[in-house]
Image (cartoon, helix red, strand yellow):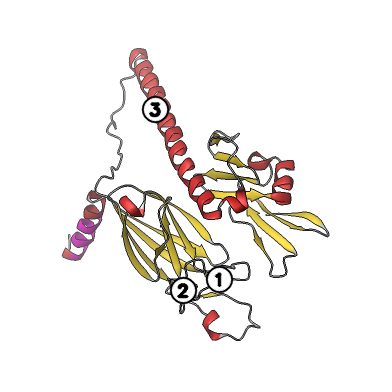
Amino acid sequence: MTSSRFGCLFGAFAAVALGQQTTTINVPANQSWTNTGVYLYPGSTVQIDARGVIEAVPPSDTRANFHRVPPSGRPRLDNTPQPDMPALGLLARIGEGPVLEAGAHAEFRAGGRNGTGELLLGINDGYVADNTGSWTVQVRVNDANSNISQSRNNSRFPNDSNSNERYRNDRYRNDRSQADQSSRSNDTYGASGINSKAQQLGRNVLGAPLGDVRTAADGVGRYREYGSGVIYWSPDTGAYAVLGPIRDEWVNRGAESGELGYPISDETQTRNGMNRTMRFQRGTITWNERTGARVDRR
């Protein structure tokens, strides 16, 4: 074995031993926040490296600062959600923790004031509907407490009825145990994602909660109802709020168990306020006061 191949194998082994995980996230500029599906525990360290440029205004707008915007953003503006951070820059948030400045390169430690839970990535822009493009963000998590589960039983059972029965019983118990763990995990992450989204939107948008977090009809997702809408979460999509006439149309089509599936974006509107749009797993709902709701299937 050559030294270079040995070095590669050793590096991969070291990453596993240290609980290092790396994933690449596409962060669209027309969403305030993007759920990453990366969950951070106390003591976890996350490193963020972002690249690419986005457009924060239509092509007809000649203001140079709003074109080809990198993750590091532009000079600060008073009318952005985080006026003390670069305007149009990449933001981060861990669960229900505070908003953090990410930019092109950043490193955060989960726990304490920074919070724990799902990592969210967003843009420091008060109006995202006319933004286009996306940033590519590499997220590297180092967690010394991570465990990599590996199958220990690679041997075959002898071909006799007692052994086969034991194998079936063991497999049933393992499947049940994994299902129970998955359900508890969804309870934890679902509640965290829903609470983070509710805190992000605020009571002015959602109203007061009307009940606890509940299990969705498919047994996987979670949701919570509020006075002015509902937040749905699933492991594949993250948490998004469905409101007003778009919610009514979505519910009429079976909600998360229907033809459109779970929401995958926040609701956005055009600058003139005429059209409101929301994307779902299998389609898009667009609504305006004059024509009502229109559904476009994927």
Q: Residue furthest top?
A: 162
Q: In the rendering, at what x and y percent does residue 116 appear?
A: 37, 49
Viewer-closest of 27 and 269: 269
Q: Residue at x 38, y 19 (%)?
A: 169
Picture quadrant of residue 131: bottom right
Asked if residue 43 is positioned above or below residue 182 in the image, the reply reads: below
Q: Answer yes or no: do the residues labelled 3 and 1 have beta carbons within 8 Å?
A: no
State whether residue 78 appears in this view: yes
Q: Quadrant of the C terminus?
A: bottom right
Q: Amino acid at mark 1?
A: Gly
Identity, as a three-letter code, of the amino acid under mark 3: Ser
Where residue 103 sits in the image (x, y, percent)? 40, 70
Give the distance between the C-alpha atoms of the residues marked 2 and 3, in whole angstroms: 43 Å
Q: Residue 133, which numbered label?
A: 1
Residue type marked 2: Gly
Q: Which residue is mark 3?
A: 177
Q: Give percent across and percent down for residue 108.
A: 32, 60
Q: Mark 2: few, some, or many residues within 10 Å (few <14, many ≥20)?
A: some
Q: Are circles 2 and 3 on residues that touch, CB within 8 Å?
A: no
Q: 127 or 51: which is nearer to us? A: 127
Q: Earlier in the sequence, mark 2 or mark 3?
A: 2
Q: Is residue 103 magenta?
A: no
Q: Residues within 10 Å of mark 3 (few under 14, many from 20)?
A: few
Q: Which residue is mark 2?
A: 52
**Part of the protein shown in magenta:** 4-12
Q: Are marks 1 and 2 in contact (CB under 8 Å)?
A: yes
Is residue 254 placed above or below 36 in the rendered structure? above
Please identify the dominant SS of the magenta region: helix
Q: Looking at the rendering, in which quadrant would you find the N terminus?
A: bottom left
